[in-house]
Amino acid sequence: MTARRTIAAAASCIFLALGALAQNPPSTALAAARAAYEERADPARAQAAFELFQQAAKADPAAVEARWEGARAAYFFGNYTRADAPDGEKIAVFEVGISLAKEAVALAPKDVEAHFWLGVLYGVYGEAKGVFKSLSLVSPIKQEMQTCLDLDPAVEGYGPDRVLGRLYYKLPGFKGGDNKKSIAHLEKSLAGAPTDALTKLYLAETYTSVGMKAKAIEQLLGVVATTPDPRWAPEHPSIKAKAEKLLAKLR
């Protein structure tokens, strides 16, 4: 199938789905969005999920889950499905996700998923804009992750420490970048979720940056051998490919 036909098929699916949602209750709209998200390994379904969660949120102004799940769908669509897209396109996707996550936080200030995805989206939005253009987001990211640590540090596979570990790795030293802190947070995250492939990849990258080659290789081999958590199976091929690429450089 050509790229043009693929795009046309995706647009057709989304159009039909949105038309159906206009005639169905909010619960049906959310169910359709969730069904699309579960099939997000298919680019057309990932795009559909991104669109459908927005419709589900509009259909129910009080729907917290439609909003944080929509933010999560925006993260996947922009960070994985459209990984090779121009930064401007990804920024637009992440802005939608940030808006949904902010709405979820406003509706449910104690909802840990809402805070987590808001912080994550701040991070990928900042990466798409460029680190030096996004330094103002460092404090909000830390704030959201601290809130998550206070509410439930185990959320999304001990995700708050994973996010903080990545943040300290990515930041320039004069703005608080610190590989020791990165390693401490990532090792803490991995202790809580020992099979998490993304944490292993991030930890390997930090280990590599400080010359801990043997430890980096150990984590990368773990990524390659890992059977992914079914919840994150669509993300695993991308994570595994990055691990294999770094492993080849280190060997």
Image (cartoon, helix red, strand yellow):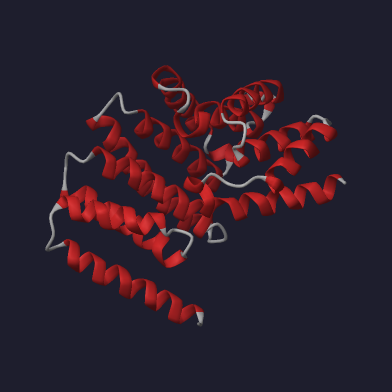
Residue 240 falls left or right of residue 123: right
* Residue 214: image location, x then y, percent: 84, 34
Q: Compared to 15, does 91 lie above or below?
A: above
Residue at horizontal 58 percent and vertical 51 percent from the top: 236
Residue 3 falls left or right of residue 62: right
Q: Which residue is more in the foreground, 234 or 105? A: 234
* Residue 122: image location, x then y, percent: 46, 38
Residue at horizontal 38 percent and vertical 55 percent from the top: 37
Residue at horizontal 68 percent and vertical 54 percent from the top: 241
* Residue 211: image location, x then y, percent: 84, 31
Residue at horizontal 53 percent and vertical 51 percent from the top: 233
Q: Compared to 100, does 108 lie above or below?
A: above
Q: Compared to 114, does 11 lie above or below?
A: below
Q: Which residue is more in the foreground, 144 or 60? A: 60
Q: Compared to 123, does 94 lie above or below?
A: below
Residue 151 falls left or right of residue 64: right
* Residue 55: image location, x then y, percent: 23, 55
